Image: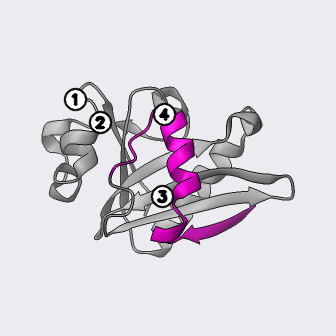
Amino acid sequence: MIASLLNAKSLSDLTAELAAAGLPTSDLAEPDRRFFQFEDVAGIIGYGGIEGDGPDRLLRSLVVKPERRGAGLGAAILGAIEQAATDNGVAALYLLTTTAEPFFRRHGYKTAERANAPAAIARSAEFRTLCLASAALLSKRIA
């Protein structure tokens, strides 16, 4: 699997995939976001990213193309994102989800109380306005 860092000008495919999956897209080009495209010899697998700076960051927009689902590629993308985060000094990843909680729990993410979210996570647009208040907040220590 090959991961390519997307720049602000190359976010259109990511935006289309996220919109099709019902995930937020309005803030993708904002600062402090790093999105990756993942591919293999068969083509694009999916996308994922990290938002923020400091030891606590938000896992953003992990999506596997529909035709590539069911083969464990989501887990591979998650592992690659976690490794990139670790390489950048991240100690914990947080995420908000309304549909993928079982997937993330299988990979070590646990429920976090929204009221106790670190400031860096709580001030993100995803936390404040983009995700439903009913979205589960999950976290995982990765370092």
Q: Nearer the viewer, residue 33 or 92?
A: 33
Name the residue carrying label 1: 133
Secondary structure, mark 2, is: loop
Query: Which is nearer the N-term, disc 3 or disc 2?
Result: 3
Secondary structure, mark 3, is: strand
Query: Which is nearer the N-term, disc 4 or disc 2?
Result: 4
Circle number at residue 105: 4
The amino acid marked with disc number 4 is Arg
Circle number at residue 131: 2
Which is in the foreground here, disc 4 or disc 1?
1
Which is in the foreground here, disc 4 or disc 2?
2
The amino acid marked with disc number 2 is Cys
Residue farthest bottom in this picture: 88
Q: Which residues are magenta?
A: 1-26
Circle number at residue 91: none
Q: CA distance from mark 3 to mark 2?
A: 16 Å
Circle number at residue 49: 3
